[in-house]
Image (tube, coloured by chain):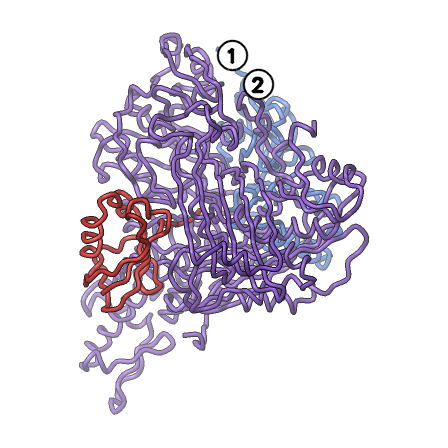
């Protein structure tokens, strides 16, 4: 498999949906319109924590143009039915309560009521006329406050606001630390941050008198939306059809459901289609950012650099309902290293903030920020090159992952060696510049996928899957069909289907599309190929077992000199005569892909007068198994790196004492812009994943993990200061620079309150 | 109910007339009334650039322009960048360089980049990055976008 | 005989046991044996992923086990 010569896989064809996207023709969620459309608006809680005493919707209902008003009373009460869909199974009861608060509001922005009206202005005006009486409760706005004795409790079902505790252990940590010559212990904090997709959540729902619901929406998972709507509304899945539009970014934030069942209920009440689009303010306050975290990590090493022991405690904010990626964080924390003795505990902590959703390798960036910072400190303490130290301890095939199973083929060593030999690693640094390196890890999901490949009479083909195309997966699927059938990529039309026309497919996310859906596509194309061989066998009157296939042609058995090979087009033209249409299909439930590892090198220049940092050079190296379309693989690496850089340098949710977000806009929630970044070099390493026919491992999530550590390590190198709290924004950095007498001072934590 | 204003304007070289309230933005009018949905709303506060259009030769965020301000003016949107079936070099280079992943920022970026190349046909990398700093992209890290714009600039000057 | 490993955090439901050998040719029979032995684990088992000889499955109920399979139970993770 690793030596296979590819004709189309590994090339860079223009994506089939590209012209639509560069001309503005492609239709995203908010671009959908229907006759008779109503517009929906949501009334949201101004309080972070309160009991709902009463809701009076009469003034809203009386406003001309208002066609429907709904509250939680209009949603059937759900017992905690569970929908598997993420690292914490999606709880329908929680999702329903999050969508429209029933008894309590648990975060500023929590939806309380919704209105459908003939214009958006009228809907918003009506929402403002709904009178809600709240019994305001003291909010819990952070981890320390949440777990402290006597803290206000968000839910009855668990104590101390801790929804879950997980633990992973190996060996004997005390004995391990006893063998260590160097022990580093630090406490790290990262803020709540948002995926930052540029397209807000948007949908149109049309509930028919026949009880059938059609939903157009921007989503990473049309089948998740379908099952969530069916579950929350209490109807058969077959009554719900979800048509995914193009999606303007997701990164995990569009796997969960906020608007669609709400729009459906409004549509049912009003008997007209309803469109709902979140404003940017609503996206920040009321969708699903990722957890703020506190990670305490202690690592011991021998003088020769061998890591011998680690002890860690992780606290992750779940937001208003349980389900942070604390468990995933605990499992990722030590994944790059072979450490024989460790204890890792992780806590899922509820706080009065929006319920967190997945964000690209959820849980891993915060954990590896801690690990890679501590490993960097150990390297400094021992006087060792940071890459050498990592290589000395790097996990390899046959090692046991910290979460239990043994690693199959993995590429961490190859990635680190590529980093060490990259010109970036040895390039000279200028004044006030520092360099950092860090690793990243993600499991890479498998899960369920279906694919259909159909053949046209002229020998062109179509491939259909249920995965919205966030970053080039359509063209990759066309490349796979081209490869399997031996026809040019331009003769394959890839499409994203809806929930009626695609077999069940799990989300576009988890770095799984080219791996799991790709496998289904390859199998479906193989099914077509087998059917073509059968047609050739029929034409030649030979046994199908004797028909070979090479380079897009059925080859007759030797000795049959009168028969010439038949191309796909020739066989396709004969379909009606040889048995009818050819449809290839496949569906599967793939095991997890095989972990991905990356290493990034970051050069940072720090302006000592303003505290502002500039990334002056950046290299991202990653094992992807096999790059089907290298341009889009590079794009994933660069995009993930940019998000991680933003997380490290500037992004954070800023809350006031009442738990209200103060920066729900792009001006003050500062994501990287073009002038913030240099060219991001990429190096693709390919250590084949044996579970996939081409070796594909998945690429999308790993690249957000290394930047937090790489940037923090570069900052340490540039300033002499070890920052343990993100973001390394100018006020924090400047304050530390001004307070530091000597460059060798150890960890400084500046409380946010001291900086304003 | 507010009575509507009648606006006559030119969009992508064509005369267009529409009705709007005094508080509607040009972005609202383009998307909801005129039916040109290529221009996107990302924030409605002028911070993301997804709504970029060219108004009388000037790059503006259409979410901060009131619809009535288009009266008698000339507007270029993403739908007007290609010449019939022939893509503009920027559009071609965006495709060749894979300078888009989800594509939501692409219309705004192409309009902004066209305004750049109209003003400065051979920008440096730094000039390009600062000109495009008003257009957020969350997917690409900007790398391939910058390469595409610089390549389009080269192609443009090579054609002269 | 499959050797089954649990995350150490589950041991509050297993009386401290982190590893147990169970004779079962298939995952559903293995899970039934675990549920019978450790009733406190039932809710967790329903939502956990299963790694069999290094391959991690989210839905493993009818996966077959070899005579000496190594099984790890762990939280189900997908991603974003």
Label 2 neighbourhood size at 10 Å, few (<14), some (14-19), many (20+)? few
SS class, disc 2: loop
Could you say which is closer to the camera, residue B75 or residue B112?
B112
Residue A470 in the image: state x and y as whole percent: 46, 48
Question: Which residue occupies the foreground of this view, A331 or B127?
Answer: A331
Q: Residue at x 59, y 40 (%)?
A: B108
- B44 sits left or right of A596 in the view: right
Distance in Å between CA atoms under marks 2 and 1: 10 Å
Task: Identify the colour of chain B in the image.
Answer: blue
Q: What colour has chain A?
A: purple
* Pick the front one: A616 or B130: A616
Q: Tell which subunit mark 1 falls on.
A: B
Residue at 65 percent of width and 27 percent of height: A753
Residue A625: x and y in percent read 47, 65
In this view, A383 is above or below A138: below
State the red chain. Answer: C
Q: Nearer the viewer, residue A753 or A148?
A: A148
**Residue beneath label 2, please?**
B23
Residue B39 lies in what quarter of the image? top right
Q: Tags 2 and 1 in contact by the CB under 8 Å rule?
A: yes
Q: Is residue A382 left or right of residue A404?
A: right
Answer above or below: position of A489 versus A280: below
Task: Pinpoint residue B143: horizontal percent, then vertical percent.
Answer: 63, 53
Q: Which mark is residue A135?
A: none
Q: Which image quadrant for residue A45? A: top left
Residue that carries the numbered disc 1 in the rendered image: B2
Q: Position of residue A553 (x, y in %)?
A: 34, 76
């Amino acid at each position: 498999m690793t030596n296979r010569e590819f004709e189309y896989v590994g090339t860079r064809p223009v994506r089939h949906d590209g012209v639509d996207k560069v001309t503005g023709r492609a239709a995203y969620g908010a671009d959908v319109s229907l006759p008779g459309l109503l517009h929906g608006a949501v009334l949201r809680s101004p309080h972070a924590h309160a009991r709902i005493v009463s809701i009076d919707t009469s003034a809203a209902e009386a406003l001309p143009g208002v066609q429907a008003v709904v509250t939680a009373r209009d949603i059937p009460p759900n017992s905690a039915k569970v929908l598997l869909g993420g690292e914490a199974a999606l709880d329908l009861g929680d999702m329903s309560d999050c969508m429209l608060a029933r008894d309590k509001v648990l975060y500023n922005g929590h939806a309380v009521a919704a209105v459908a009206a003939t214009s958006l202005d009228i809907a918003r005006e009506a929402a403002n006329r709904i009178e809600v009486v709240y019994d305001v409760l003291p909010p819990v706005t952070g981890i320390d406050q949440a777990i402290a004795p006597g803290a206000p409790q968000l839910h009855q079902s668990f104590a101390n606001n801790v929804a879950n505790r997980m633990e992973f252990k190996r060996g004997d940590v005390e004995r391990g630390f006893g063998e260590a010559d160097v022990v580093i212990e630090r406490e790290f904090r990262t803020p709540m941050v948002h995926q930052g997709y540029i397209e807000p959540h948007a949908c149109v729902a049309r509930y028919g008198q026949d009880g059938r619901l059609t939903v157009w929406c921007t989503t990473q998972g049309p089948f998740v939306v379908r099952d969530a709507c069916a579950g929350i509304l209490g109807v058969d899945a077959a009554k719900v059809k979800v048509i995914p539009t193009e999606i303007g970014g997701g990164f995990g934030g569009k796997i969960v459901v906020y608007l669609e069942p709400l729009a459906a209920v409004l549509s049912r009440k009003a008997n007209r289609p309803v469109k709902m689009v979140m404003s940017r303010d609503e996206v920040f306050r009321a969708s699903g950012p990722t957890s703020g975290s506190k990670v305490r990590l202690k690592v011991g090493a021998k003088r020769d650099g061998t890591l011998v022991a680690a002890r860690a405690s992780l606290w992750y904010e779940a937001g208003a309902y349980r389900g942070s990626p604390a468990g995933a964080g605990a499992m990722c924390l030590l994944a790059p290293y072979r450490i024989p003795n460790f204890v890792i505990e992780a806590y899922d902590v509820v706080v009065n903030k929006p319920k967190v959703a997945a964000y690209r390798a959820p849980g891993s960036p915060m954990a590896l920020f801690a690990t890679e910072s501590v490993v960097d400190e150990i390297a400094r303490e021992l006087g060792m090159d940071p890459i050498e130290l990592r290589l000395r301890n790097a996990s390899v095939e046959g090692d046991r992952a910290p979460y239990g199973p043994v690693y199959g083929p993995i590429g961490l060593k190859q990635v680190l060696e590529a980093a060490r030999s990259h010109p970036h690693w040895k390039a000279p640094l200028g004044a006030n510049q520092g360099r950092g390196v860090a690793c990243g890890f993600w499991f890479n999901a498998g899960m369920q996928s279906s694919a259909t490949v159909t053949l046209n009479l002229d020998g062109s083909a179509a491939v259909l899957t249920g995965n919205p195309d966030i970053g080039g997966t359509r063209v990759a699927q066309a490349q796979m069909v081209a490869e399997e059938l031996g026809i040019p990529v331009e003769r394959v039309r890839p499409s994203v289907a809806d929930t009626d026309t695609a077999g069940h497919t799990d989300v576009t996310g988890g770095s799984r599309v080219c791996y799991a859906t790709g496998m289904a596509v390859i199998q479906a194309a193989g099914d077509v190929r087998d059917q073509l061989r059968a047609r050739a066998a029929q034409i030649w009157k030979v046994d199908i077992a004797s028909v070979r296939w090479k380079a897009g042609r059925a080859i007759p058995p030797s000795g049959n000199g009168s028969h010439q090979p038949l191309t796909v087009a020739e066989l396709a033209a004969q379909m009606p005569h040889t048995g009818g249409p050819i449809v290839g299909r496949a569906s599967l439930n793939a095991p997890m892909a095989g972990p991905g590892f990356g290493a990034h090198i970051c050069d940072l220049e720090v302006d000592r007068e303003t505290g502002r940092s500039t990334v002056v050079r950046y290299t991202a190296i990653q094992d992807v198994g096999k790059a089907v379309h290298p341009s889009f693989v590079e794009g994933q690496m660069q995009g993930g790196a940019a998000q991680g850089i933003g997380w490290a340098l500037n992004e954070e949710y800023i809350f006031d004492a009442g738990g209200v977000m103060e920066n729900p806009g792009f001006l003050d929630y500062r994501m990287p812009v073009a002038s913030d970044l240099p060219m991001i070099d990429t190096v693709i390493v390919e250590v084949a994943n044996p579970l996939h026919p081409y070796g594909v491992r998945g690429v999308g999530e790993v690249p957000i993990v290394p930047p937090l550590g790489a940037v923090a390590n570069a900052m340490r190198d540039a300033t002499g200061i070890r920052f343990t709290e993100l973001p390394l924004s100018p006020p924090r950095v400047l304050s530390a620079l001004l307070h530091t007498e000597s460059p060798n001072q150890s960890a400084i934590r500046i409380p946010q309150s001291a900086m304003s | 109910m507010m009575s509507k204003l009648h606006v006559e304007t030119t969009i992508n070289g064509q005369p267009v007339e529409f009705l709007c309230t005094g508080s509607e933005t040009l972005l609202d009018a383009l998307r909801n009334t005129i039916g040109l949905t290529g221009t996107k709303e990302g924030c409605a506060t002028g911070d993301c650039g997804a709504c970029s259009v060219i108004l009388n030769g000037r790059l503006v965020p259409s979410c901060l322009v009131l619809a009535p301000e288009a009266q008698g003016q000339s507007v270029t949107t993403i739908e007007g960048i290609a010449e019939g079936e022939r893509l503009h070099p920027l559009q071609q280079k965006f495709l060749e360089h894979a300078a888009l992943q989800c594509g939501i920022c692409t219309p705004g970026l192409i309009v902004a980049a066209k305004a750049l190349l109209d003003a400065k046909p051979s920008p440096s990398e730094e000039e390009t990055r600062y000109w495009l700093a008003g257009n957020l992209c969350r997917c690409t890290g900007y790398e391939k976008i910058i390469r595409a714009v610089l390549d389009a600039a080269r192609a443009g000057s090579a054609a002269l | 005989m499959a050797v089954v490993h649990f995350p150490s955090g589950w041991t509050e439901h297993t009386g401290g046991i982190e590893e147990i050998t169970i004779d079962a040719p298939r995952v559903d029979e293995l899970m039934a044996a675990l549920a019978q032995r450790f009733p406190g684990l039932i809710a967790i088992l329903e939502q956990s992923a299963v790694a069999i000889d290094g391959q991690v499955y989210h839905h493993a109920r009818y996966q077959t086990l070899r005579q000496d399979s190594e099984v790890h139970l762990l939280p189900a993770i997908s991603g974003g």
